[in-house]
Image: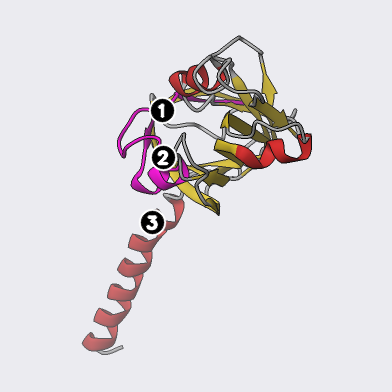
Amino acid sequence: MTRLSSALLAASVAGAALAIPATSAHAAESICTFTGDVGWNVRDSFNSYLLGNIANGSAYKHKGGLDVRDGVQTDGNGKTPALTWPVDSVTSSKISTSGGAHWTGHNLYTGDDLAEVPNNFTLDLDFSNITVELSGSTGRLLVDYTSREINTHTLGEFQTGEQAELATITFAKAPDLTSNSVNVTGDVALTADGVEVFGGFYTAGEELAPITLNLTADEGCGSTPEQ
Protein backbone atom coordinates (compact mmCIF):
# COMPACT_ATOMS: atom_id res chain seq x y z
CA MET A 1 0.00 0.00 0.00
CA THR A 2 1.34 3.44 -0.91
CA ARG A 3 1.72 6.26 1.58
CA LEU A 4 -1.14 8.09 -0.18
CA SER A 5 -3.44 5.09 0.09
CA SER A 6 -2.58 4.65 3.77
CA ALA A 7 -3.32 8.30 4.44
CA LEU A 8 -6.68 8.13 2.67
CA LEU A 9 -7.64 4.98 4.61
CA ALA A 10 -6.71 6.57 7.93
CA ALA A 11 -8.73 9.68 7.10
CA SER A 12 -11.72 7.55 6.15
CA VAL A 13 -11.59 5.58 9.42
CA ALA A 14 -11.22 8.78 11.44
CA GLY A 15 -14.18 10.34 9.62
CA ALA A 16 -16.34 7.31 10.35
CA ALA A 17 -15.37 7.40 14.03
CA LEU A 18 -16.34 11.05 14.20
CA ALA A 19 -19.70 10.31 12.58
CA ILE A 20 -20.72 7.72 15.19
CA PRO A 21 -21.35 10.15 18.07
CA ALA A 22 -23.46 12.37 15.79
CA THR A 23 -25.80 9.45 15.12
CA SER A 24 -25.96 8.27 18.69
CA ALA A 25 -26.59 11.80 19.91
CA HIS A 26 -30.18 11.71 18.65
CA ALA A 27 -32.43 11.92 21.70
CA ALA A 28 -34.71 8.98 22.35
CA GLU A 29 -38.12 9.69 20.88
CA SER A 30 -41.36 8.88 22.63
CA ILE A 31 -43.31 5.87 21.39
CA CYS A 32 -46.03 6.57 23.92
CA THR A 33 -49.69 7.05 23.23
CA PHE A 34 -51.00 9.77 25.51
CA THR A 35 -54.43 10.65 26.83
CA GLY A 36 -55.28 13.79 28.72
CA ASP A 37 -56.06 17.41 28.05
CA VAL A 38 -54.69 20.88 27.52
CA GLY A 39 -55.94 23.44 30.01
CA TRP A 40 -56.38 26.90 28.52
CA ASN A 41 -59.21 29.38 29.06
CA VAL A 42 -57.96 32.15 26.70
CA ARG A 43 -57.92 34.93 29.33
CA ASP A 44 -59.88 35.58 32.51
CA SER A 45 -60.60 39.21 31.65
CA PHE A 46 -61.90 38.16 28.22
CA ASN A 47 -64.34 35.68 29.74
CA SER A 48 -65.32 38.09 32.48
CA TYR A 49 -66.07 40.81 29.93
CA LEU A 50 -68.04 38.56 27.64
CA LEU A 51 -69.95 36.61 30.27
CA GLY A 52 -70.73 39.69 32.34
CA ASN A 53 -73.10 42.63 32.06
CA ILE A 54 -71.12 44.52 29.42
CA ALA A 55 -71.36 42.14 26.45
CA ASN A 56 -74.45 40.23 27.57
CA GLY A 57 -76.22 42.45 30.04
CA SER A 58 -79.67 44.01 30.23
CA ALA A 59 -78.90 46.38 27.36
CA TYR A 60 -79.40 43.50 24.94
CA LYS A 61 -82.66 41.72 24.23
CA HIS A 62 -80.85 38.59 23.05
CA LYS A 63 -77.91 37.17 24.96
CA GLY A 64 -74.93 35.08 23.93
CA GLY A 65 -72.17 33.69 26.12
CA LEU A 66 -69.90 30.67 25.86
CA ASP A 67 -70.70 27.33 24.22
CA VAL A 68 -68.29 24.37 24.15
CA ARG A 69 -68.48 21.26 21.97
CA ASP A 70 -66.91 17.96 20.98
CA GLY A 71 -65.20 17.14 24.25
CA VAL A 72 -64.10 20.58 25.44
CA GLN A 73 -65.03 20.90 29.10
CA THR A 74 -65.76 23.91 31.30
CA ASP A 75 -66.08 23.97 35.06
CA GLY A 76 -68.86 26.55 34.73
CA ASN A 77 -67.12 28.85 37.19
CA GLY A 78 -69.18 31.97 36.63
CA LYS A 79 -67.41 34.63 34.60
CA THR A 80 -63.98 32.94 34.63
CA PRO A 81 -64.51 29.31 33.60
CA ALA A 82 -61.60 26.90 33.29
CA LEU A 83 -61.54 25.21 29.87
CA THR A 84 -59.90 21.88 29.03
CA TRP A 85 -59.32 20.70 25.47
CA PRO A 86 -59.13 16.90 24.91
CA VAL A 87 -55.88 15.57 23.49
CA ASP A 88 -56.30 14.03 20.06
CA SER A 89 -52.73 13.09 19.14
CA VAL A 90 -49.17 13.58 20.38
CA THR A 91 -45.87 13.48 18.50
CA SER A 92 -42.38 14.39 19.65
CA SER A 93 -42.98 18.01 18.68
CA LYS A 94 -46.73 18.58 18.59
CA ILE A 95 -49.81 18.11 20.77
CA SER A 96 -53.11 18.31 18.91
CA THR A 97 -56.52 18.65 20.54
CA SER A 98 -60.10 18.34 19.33
CA GLY A 99 -63.30 20.20 20.08
CA GLY A 100 -64.13 23.87 20.09
CA ALA A 101 -65.43 26.88 22.00
CA HIS A 102 -67.65 29.70 20.77
CA TRP A 103 -67.97 33.12 22.45
CA THR A 104 -70.71 35.62 21.52
CA GLY A 105 -71.79 39.00 22.86
CA HIS A 106 -73.20 42.44 22.01
CA ASN A 107 -76.24 41.30 20.02
CA LEU A 108 -77.71 44.13 17.93
CA TYR A 109 -80.94 42.39 16.96
CA THR A 110 -84.08 43.64 18.74
CA GLY A 111 -86.70 41.65 16.85
CA ASP A 112 -88.49 38.41 17.66
CA ASP A 113 -87.25 36.12 14.89
CA LEU A 114 -84.88 33.80 16.75
CA ALA A 115 -83.31 32.70 13.48
CA GLU A 116 -81.78 36.18 13.21
CA VAL A 117 -80.15 36.14 16.63
CA PRO A 118 -76.97 34.18 15.76
CA ASN A 119 -76.19 36.55 12.88
CA ASN A 120 -76.13 39.71 14.97
CA PHE A 121 -73.40 39.32 17.58
CA THR A 122 -70.75 41.99 17.09
CA LEU A 123 -68.43 39.93 19.28
CA ASP A 124 -68.33 36.48 17.72
CA LEU A 125 -65.25 34.28 18.18
CA ASP A 126 -64.83 30.55 17.64
CA PHE A 127 -61.69 28.51 18.42
CA SER A 128 -61.21 24.84 17.57
CA ASN A 129 -58.49 22.21 17.21
CA ILE A 130 -55.91 24.09 19.25
CA THR A 131 -52.38 22.79 18.76
CA VAL A 132 -49.25 23.18 20.84
CA GLU A 133 -46.01 23.00 18.84
CA LEU A 134 -42.97 22.29 21.01
CA SER A 135 -39.36 23.37 20.72
CA GLY A 136 -37.56 22.69 23.98
CA SER A 137 -38.96 24.95 26.68
CA THR A 138 -40.76 27.18 24.17
CA GLY A 139 -43.63 26.62 21.80
CA ARG A 140 -46.37 28.03 19.62
CA LEU A 141 -50.13 27.95 20.12
CA LEU A 142 -52.05 27.39 16.87
CA VAL A 143 -55.83 27.54 16.35
CA ASP A 144 -58.53 27.14 13.76
CA TYR A 145 -60.74 30.18 14.12
CA THR A 146 -63.70 32.21 12.95
CA SER A 147 -64.03 35.78 14.24
CA ARG A 148 -65.43 39.21 13.49
CA GLU A 149 -63.46 42.41 13.47
CA ILE A 150 -64.71 43.83 16.74
CA ASN A 151 -66.82 46.97 16.86
CA THR A 152 -69.60 46.96 19.42
CA HIS A 153 -71.84 49.23 17.33
CA THR A 154 -71.73 47.57 13.90
CA LEU A 155 -71.25 44.05 12.57
CA GLY A 156 -67.71 43.47 11.34
CA GLU A 157 -66.81 41.08 8.55
CA PHE A 158 -66.12 37.45 9.41
CA GLN A 159 -62.60 36.13 8.95
CA THR A 160 -61.44 32.53 9.20
CA GLY A 161 -58.17 30.64 9.35
CA GLU A 162 -56.68 27.22 10.04
CA GLN A 163 -53.78 26.62 12.42
CA ALA A 164 -53.02 30.31 12.72
CA GLU A 165 -50.23 31.24 15.12
CA LEU A 166 -52.17 32.78 17.96
CA ALA A 167 -49.46 33.00 20.60
CA THR A 168 -46.00 32.03 21.76
CA ILE A 169 -45.49 29.81 24.82
CA THR A 170 -42.70 29.78 27.37
CA PHE A 171 -42.80 26.71 29.62
CA ALA A 172 -41.44 26.51 33.14
CA LYS A 173 -39.52 23.47 31.92
CA ALA A 174 -39.29 21.58 28.63
CA PRO A 175 -42.11 19.00 28.34
CA ASP A 176 -40.60 15.49 28.42
CA LEU A 177 -42.68 13.37 26.06
CA THR A 178 -40.62 10.27 26.82
CA SER A 179 -41.95 10.16 30.39
CA ASN A 180 -45.07 8.37 31.61
CA SER A 181 -46.79 11.60 32.55
CA VAL A 182 -46.45 15.25 31.66
CA ASN A 183 -47.76 18.14 33.74
CA VAL A 184 -46.21 21.46 32.84
CA THR A 185 -47.47 25.04 32.58
CA GLY A 186 -46.38 27.75 30.18
CA ASP A 187 -46.85 31.51 29.86
CA VAL A 188 -48.72 32.60 26.72
CA ALA A 189 -48.19 35.86 24.80
CA LEU A 190 -50.23 37.07 21.83
CA THR A 191 -48.49 37.30 18.44
CA ALA A 192 -49.06 39.87 15.71
CA ASP A 193 -51.09 37.28 13.79
CA GLY A 194 -53.06 36.64 16.97
CA VAL A 195 -54.20 40.27 17.02
CA GLU A 196 -56.07 39.65 13.77
CA VAL A 197 -57.48 36.37 15.08
CA PHE A 198 -59.02 38.27 18.00
CA GLY A 199 -60.47 40.85 15.63
CA GLY A 200 -58.30 43.61 17.09
CA PHE A 201 -59.50 43.02 20.66
CA TYR A 202 -55.92 42.92 22.01
CA THR A 203 -52.46 44.11 20.97
CA ALA A 204 -49.37 42.02 20.17
CA GLY A 205 -47.38 40.87 23.18
CA GLU A 206 -50.30 40.93 25.62
CA GLU A 207 -50.38 38.11 28.12
CA LEU A 208 -53.12 35.52 27.67
CA ALA A 209 -54.12 32.79 30.11
CA PRO A 210 -51.36 30.30 30.98
CA ILE A 211 -51.56 26.91 29.29
CA THR A 212 -51.13 23.55 31.04
CA LEU A 213 -50.32 20.19 29.48
CA ASN A 214 -51.83 17.27 31.40
CA LEU A 215 -50.79 14.02 29.70
CA THR A 216 -50.73 10.39 30.80
CA ALA A 217 -49.05 7.70 28.73
CA ASP A 218 -50.60 4.31 28.08
CA GLU A 219 -49.36 1.37 30.11
CA GLY A 220 -46.11 0.00 28.76
CA CYS A 221 -44.90 3.35 27.49
CA GLY A 222 -41.22 3.46 26.70
CA SER A 223 -38.66 5.09 24.47
CA THR A 224 -37.03 4.04 21.25
CA PRO A 225 -33.40 2.91 21.66
CA GLU A 226 -30.83 5.55 20.88
CA GLN A 227 -29.37 5.13 17.42
Instruction: Look at the numbered disc 1 and give the secondary structure of its residue.
Output: loop
**Residue topped by disc 2:** 167
Q: Nearer the viewer, residue 166 or 140?
A: 166
The percent position of residue 106, horizontal first and vertical second, equals 55, 29
Alpha carbon of mark 3 to alpha carbon of mark 2: how far? 34 Å
- At horizontal 77% and vertical 34% (from top left) the residue drawn is 114
Quarter of the image where the N terminus is located: bottom left
Label 2, residues with CA under 10 Å away: few <14, some 14-19, many ≥20: many
Task: Look at mark 1 in the image and give the residue it sits on.
Answer: 208
Q: Nearer the viewer, residue 179 or 211?
A: 211
Residue of label 3: 22
Instruction: Look at label 3 and name its amino acid.
Output: Ala
Q: Is any atom of residue 26 visible in this view?
A: yes
Residue 199 left/right relative to 225 = left
- Tell me the magenta residue range: 187-215
Check the image and report above or below for 39 versus 76.
Answer: below
Residue 194: quadrant of the picture: top left
